[in-house]
Structures are given as C-alpha cells and as structure tokens.
Amino acid sequence: MLPNIQQQYDSLKLKLEALLQHLDSLSGEKLSFKAGPDKWSIAEVIEHLVVAEQDLLKQLSTHIPASTLDLGAKTPEKHQTVIKVMERDIEVDVPHESLEPHGRIALEDLLNQWEDIRQKLPGLLAEIKPENEDDPVYQHPYGGPLDLSDTLQFFEVHFDNHMRHIDRILAQAKGMINGNF
C-alpha cells in the first residue's frame, strides 16, 4: 500500500476501533434512541456508515473505468464543499437514497459487515500503484469522481462527522431514558 494511503487507512482503522469500544458501553435503549420521528438513532448512524463503506468497497473492487465517470463533475470546489459541510456539521440530506438507513439490520450484523469490509479494504487499496494513485476510484454522489487520497479523506471526515452526530444523539437522550444517563 502506498505510504500516504497506509497512513489514511490506519487513521480510519483506529477511529473504528475507538467507536467499537464506545458502542460496547451503550445499552440497547441508547443505541435505538431517536430524538424525533425523522431523526436517526445511533444504530441507524452505524448502518449509514456501513452502507457507505460497502459502496466504497464495491466501487474499488469493480475498478470503475475513468471513461465511465463524468470527470467534469469533479471540481476542487465541489470536493471541498463536501468536506467543509461535514467538518462544520451542517445538516444535509443523504446524497443518494441507497445510503439512507432503514433500521432493519441488527447492530451485530452491521458490525460483522463492517468487519468484513475492513478485512477486504487493505487488499484493494494495496492494488493501487503509484502511477495510478491520481486516477478516480470512487464516485461521490455530489463531489464527483475522487482519487484515492481524496476518497479516504472523504471517508475520514464522514466518519468524524457521524461520531459527532452520535455524541449529539447521546446528549439529546440524556435524562430521557429512565434516568439511566
């Protein structure tokens, strides 16, 4: 794996490990708490993260030919807009309905799926050679085609955004579930 890509992947790996430890400390009530009918639970946030990474894995494993991507759709401004929106926790709709959580998958199953993704991901990342590292590998619904470094940057910022989302859900739930917080 390219050194800069290895660093980005290692950072994602550490963040997931920290999240898994945090999830172990949460009750089922906390995991399923919703602040409103149109709000996500922590379990649904996890589902969204897993579905997004499944999409990444699928796109990496199919080796999307650059000729099939609308390379004009990628601009530095679009990519940076996506990053800034997530870094600033600006609430936006999910950019594609396939990334919307449905809450029908048990957390244990989601975590098993995530483990499977994270076992396959390093091998796919290692297949990318230095001469191809600037080639698009992932099509973001808004940001357009991204090279590997931009893709991993997106997934790290996306992960961080949703960790703060989980913190907000826990703060909203504080004191609302039988005083167990």
Image (cartoon, rainbow, N blue to C red):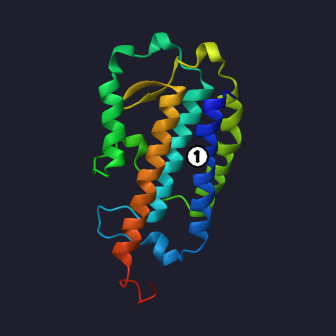
Point out residue 154 in the picture as x, y percentages from the top left corner.
45, 38
Q: Residues within 10 Å of mark 1 (few under 14, many from 20)?
A: some
Q: Is residue 71 left or right of residue 55?
A: left
| Residue found at the far top of this picture | 67
* 166 relative to 181, above or below: above
* 134 relative to 170, above or below: above
The secondary structure type at the circle numbered 1 is: helix
* 48 relative to 59, above or below: below
Kindly identify the residue that appears in the image at 43 percent across and 16 percent down. Answer: 69
Total labels: the figure holds 1
Could you tell me the amino acid type at mark 1? Leu
Of the 4 image quadrants, the one containing the C terminus is bottom left
Kindly identify the residue that appears in the image at 42 percent across and 66 percent down. Answer: 167
Point out residue 89 in the picture as x, y percentages from the top left corner.
32, 52
Of the 4 image quadrants, the one containing the N terminus is top right
Q: Nearer the viewer, residue 28 or 86?
A: 86
Q: Quadrant of residue 41?
A: bottom left
Point out residue 10 in the picture as x, y percentages from the top left corner.
64, 43
Q: Quadrant of residue 177?
A: bottom left
Kindly identify the residue that appears in the image at 65 percent across and 37 percent down. Answer: 121
Q: Nearer the viewer, residue 116 or 20?
A: 20
* 118 relative to 27, above or below: above
Q: Is residue 26 left or right of residue 146?
A: right
Residue 48 seen in the current view: no
Tell me the residue that label 1 is attached to.
Answer: 12
Residue 135 seen in the current view: yes
Kindly identify the residue that appears in the image at 60 percent across and 60 percent down. Answer: 18
Q: Is residue 113 left or right of residue 28?
A: right
